[in-house]
């Protein structure tokens, strides 16, 4: 059965956000090409079980650093959602090779393949890490899309993930200006919500550790949280709305860790929560605005819904009791 909305490609289709993007696109009658590291791998079985997948989903083995493998996945598509990117969960011995190069070179490879395939619009998933690491931003001023993380500051503080996201996003927008390719970037904050994929991803681990680790004391960091399903919706919206342009911050709830734990405890009292909290630094104060995205018509669900659905999905997967 041919899909009514045309054909699009999703890189990193088997990942946390990628899986939800594939699910949303299929339910909106798109035919989807998904790139994964290895087709036939059991960890991508959940994709083939999605509704309409048997008719409208085709998986391609692709590596971001292998231009030709990307070309075969993108050819014939009118739109591309570039979701794949390395997220290091620990410190990395060689950041240039392990984090920065795959993010920057990988993104440029995707964009070059899009030019070759005559793709109409590309949505690149960046991160709020490319926005808020900026010591020169006026204190107390809400950060919007004009704010960029300072590359020198990221390097000095060894924040390789922030540096990789900042470099990849700025290169993507520069590439768009040079070539005329229609590129839109979306910068989500910490993404929580139910899992579709079997492996636990880095952002979900933040919540799982609060439930399981029983820390004696923990820094009460300020957290900006957004639901994975709402991010997927934002990506589809900027793809479909002709007036969308440039970059979009995607965030919903700002909460301190001790308030987050209080909220969790009131719904799920029996988990092994942190015993006490130390006042957190403002970590470049994450006062961010999604106003630009909301003007396009984006809205988000309540934090309670995100937390309840996350934990129910962790229970189902046997990650927590």
Image (spheres, rainbow, N blue to C red):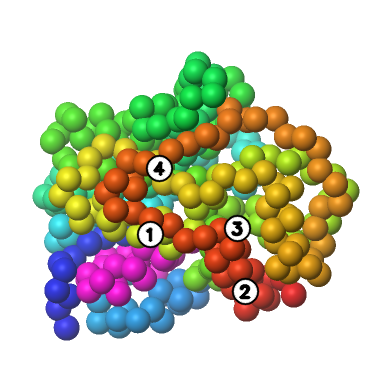
- Mark 2 to mark 1: distance in Å? 20 Å
Image-quadrant location for residue 316: bottom right
Measuring from the top left, give residue 94's x and y in whole percent: 58, 34
| Depth order, front residue of 4/89 | 4
Specify whether 158 is left or right of 185. Answer: right
Mark earlier in primary sequence (4, 1): 1
Mark earlier in primary sequence (1, 3): 3
Please give the range of residues in magenta. Answer: 12-39
Q: Secondary structure at mark 4?
A: loop
Q: Secondary structure at mark 1?
A: helix
| Depth order, front residue of 5/257 | 257
Q: Are marks 1 and 3 in contact (CB under 8 Å)?
A: no
- Mark 4 to mark 3: distance in Å? 22 Å
Q: Residues within 10 Å of mark 4 (few under 14, many from 20)?
A: some
Q: Residue at x 23, y 53 (%)?
A: 239
Q: Is residue 69 above or below residue 247?
A: below
What numbered label is drawn on residue 204?
3
Specify whether 76 is left or right of 286. Answer: left
What residue would you read off at disc 1?
232
Measuring from the top left, give residue 302's x and y in whole percent: 52, 60
- In reply to whether residue 24 is colored magenta, the answer given is yes
Measuring from the top left, give residue 4's x and y in whole percent: 14, 74
Measuring from the top left, give residue 42's x and y in whole percent: 50, 75
Image-quadrant location for residue 223: top right
What residue would you read off at disc 2?
312
Mark earlier in primary sequence (2, 3): 3
What residue would you read off at disc 4?
290
- Mark 4 to mark 1: distance in Å? 15 Å
């Amino acid at each position: 059965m041919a899909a009514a909305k045309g054909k699009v490609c999703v890189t990193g289709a088997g990942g946390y956000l990628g899986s939800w993007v594939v699910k949303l696109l299929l339910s909106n009658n798109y035919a989807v090409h998904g790139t994964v590291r290895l087709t036939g791998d059991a960890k991508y079985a959940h994709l083939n079980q999605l509704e309409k997948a048997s008719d409208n989903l085709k998986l391609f083995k692709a590596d971001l650093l292998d231009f030709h493998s990307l070309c075969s996945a993108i050819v014939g598509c009118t739109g591309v959602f570039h979701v794949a990117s390395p997220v290091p969960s620990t410190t990395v011995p060689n950041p240039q090779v392990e984090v920065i190069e795959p993010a920057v070179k990988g993104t440029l490879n995707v964009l070059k393949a899009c030019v070759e395939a005559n793709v109409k619009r590309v949505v690149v998933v960046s991160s709020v890490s490319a926005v808020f690491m900026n010591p020169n931003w006026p204190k107390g001023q809400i950060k919007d899309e004009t704010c960029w993380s300072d590359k020198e500051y990221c390097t000095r503080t060894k924040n390789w993930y922030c540096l990789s996201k900042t470099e990849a996003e700025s290169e993507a927008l520069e590439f768009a200006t040079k070539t005329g390719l229609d590129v839109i970037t979306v910068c989500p904050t910490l993404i929580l919500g139910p899992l579709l994929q079997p492996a636990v991803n880095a952002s979900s681990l933040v919540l799982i550790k609060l439930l399981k680790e029983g820390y004696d004391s923990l820094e009460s960091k300020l957290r900006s949280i957004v639901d994975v399903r709402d991010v997927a919706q934002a990506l589809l919206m900027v793809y479909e709305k002709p007036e969308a342009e440039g970059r979009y911050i995607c965030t919903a709830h700002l909460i301190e860790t001790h308030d987050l734990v209080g909220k969790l405890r009131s719904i799920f009292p029996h988990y092994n929560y942190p015993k006490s909290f130390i006042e957190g630094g403002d970590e470049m104060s994450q006062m961010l605005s999604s106003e630009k995205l909301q003007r396009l018509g984006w809205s988000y669900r309540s934090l309670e819904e995100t937390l309840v659905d996350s934990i129910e999905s962790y229970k189902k997967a046997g990650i927590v009791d």
